[in-house]
Image (cartoon, helix red, strand yellow):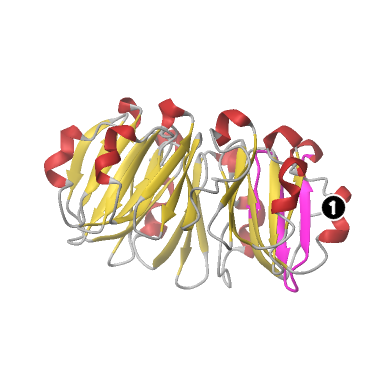
């Protein structure tokens, strides 16, 4: 547990109550709520060098080191305690990711190891020897994971009602999958032919029938927030479906970012358009004059957005108490910003 660093930060991530930052040289600094991962004292000696990635659940962190080992801390039931799979995490780990309550690691031999809350990690308790050709892993929703295999197929697991059970779309997931993303309780897969397949909770995007004719080709990337999906098409249009309905929009859009209940999109000319829950960043009218040009990247958190402009300045909006109001550090965000986490 410590204070937020003021320089030399390479990358950062957060649980629901704590932050962890990788510094130049590969050491890690943590701060925030000690019960949510800010207290890393028990593993401090292992975090002094060589850390290349840190990921989080809602209450724990996992750090991947350059030597292929993984270090965990925070709430034990949320993945902070990895003792049950320690033998698999001592070396040879190629990738780690987390959802709300569990972590999954891909080993260099193509097998998979999971730990944390059983509800979120699903049927894969320790290792998955039958899946030894996994090339990438990712959380698909807050309740589920998926593994990409070398043949282009996808395997899913976790809570069956919230994306862990992909049997509804299984016939489409045997080859040619290039991206999977999720809302809280549903999943969508982008296929190599530019079409989209969905499964999971119908109300949160598992049912895309209302825009099915628009998802048969031309999609280049998928985005999501907690309850809705957006598909970006090659012509710059977007297709929207999920909890708040079905629609499409034409508008030279090049990227989309979600908060908990809203989206922000950058157009080709660097201006920003927002929609969704006003209280979670869907209403950007108070900073609209600053979002008419020059925006190069947008970071979204649960209820707010931060946009980096080409001049190195940052514009924020959304719920004030969770980052939408950056007035306290405004003098530090006028120039020179290269990344926001």
Q: Residue 302, image x and y in percent?
A: 52, 40
Q: Is residue 61 magenta?
A: no
* Prevalent SS, magenta region: strand
Left or right, 241 with reference to 3: left
Q: Secondary structure at mark 1?
A: helix
Task: Please state the total of marks drawn on the protein image.
Answer: 1
Q: Quadrant of the C terminus?
A: bottom right
Residue 284 visible to the viewer: no
Question: Residue at left 66%, top 63%?
Answer: 92
Question: Residue at left 50%, top 55%?
Answer: 132
Q: Where are the magenta residues, as a range?
A: 13-33
Left or right, 307 with reference to 233: right
| Up-down relation of residue 319 to residue 95 (above or below) | above
Q: Residue 69, image x and y in percent?
A: 72, 60
- Identify the residue at the far left of this view: 213
Location of mark 1 (residue): 43
Q: Is residue 32 magenta?
A: yes
Q: Residue 266, image x and y in percent?
A: 34, 59
Q: Residue 213, image x and y in percent?
A: 11, 42
Left or right, 188 with reference to 233: right
Q: Choose top left, top right, bottom left or bottom right for residue 21.
A: bottom right
Seen from the viewer's position, the closer of residues 333 and 286 is 333
* Label 1 Cα neighbours within 10 Å, binned few <14 / some 14-19 / many ≥20: few
Question: Residue at left 28%, top 56%?
Answer: 176
Residue 192 visible to the viewer: yes
Q: Choose top left, top right, bottom left or bottom right for residue 7.
A: bottom right
Question: Residue at left 55%, top 70%?
Answer: 338
Seen from the viewer's position, the closer of residues 328 and 321 is 321
- Identify the residue at the far front of this view: 130
């Amino acid at each position: 547990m410590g204070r937020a660093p003021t320089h030399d930060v390479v990358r950062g991530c957060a649980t629901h109550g704590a932050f962890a930052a990788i510094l130049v040289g590969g050491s890690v600094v943590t701060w925030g709520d000690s019960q949510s991962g800010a207290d890393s004292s028990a593993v401090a000696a292992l975090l002094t060098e060589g850390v290349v990635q840190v990921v989080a659940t809602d209450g724990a962190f996992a750090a991947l080191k350059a030597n292929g080992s993984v270090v965990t801390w925070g709430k034990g039931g949320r993945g902070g305690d990895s003792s049950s799979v320690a033998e698999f995490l001592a070396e040879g780990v190629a990738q780690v990711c987390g959802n709300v309550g569990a972590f999954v690691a891909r080993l260099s031999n193509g097998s998979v190891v999971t730990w944390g809350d059983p509800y979120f990690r699903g049927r894969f308790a320790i290792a998955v020897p039958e899946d030894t050709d996994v090339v990438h892993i990712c959380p698909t929703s807050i309740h589920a994971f998926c593994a990409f295999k070398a043949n282009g197929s996808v395997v899913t697991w976790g809570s069956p009602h919230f994306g862990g059970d992909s049997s509804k779309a299984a016939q489409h997931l045997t080859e040619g999958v290039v991206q999977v993303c999720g809302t809280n309780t549903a999943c969508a897969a982008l296929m190599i032919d530019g079409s989209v397949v969905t499964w999971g909770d119908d109300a949160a995007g598992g049912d895309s029938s209302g825009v099915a004719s628009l998802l048969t080709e031309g999609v280049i990337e998928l985005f999501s927030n907690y309850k809705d999906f957006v598909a970006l098409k090659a012509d710059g249009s977007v297709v929207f479906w999920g909890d708040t309905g079905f629609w499409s929009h034409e508008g030279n859009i090049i990227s989309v970012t979600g908060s908990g209940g809203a989206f922000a999109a950058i157009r080709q000319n660097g201006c920003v358009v927002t929609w969704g829950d006003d209280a979670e960043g869907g209403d950007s009218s108070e900073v609209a004059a600053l979002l008419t040009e020059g925006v190069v990247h947008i970071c979204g958190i649960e209820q707010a957005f931060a946009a980096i402009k080409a001049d190195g300045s940052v514009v924020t909006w959304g719920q004030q108490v969770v980052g939408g109001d950056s007035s306290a550090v405004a003098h530090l965000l006028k120039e020179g910003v290269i990344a926001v986490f």
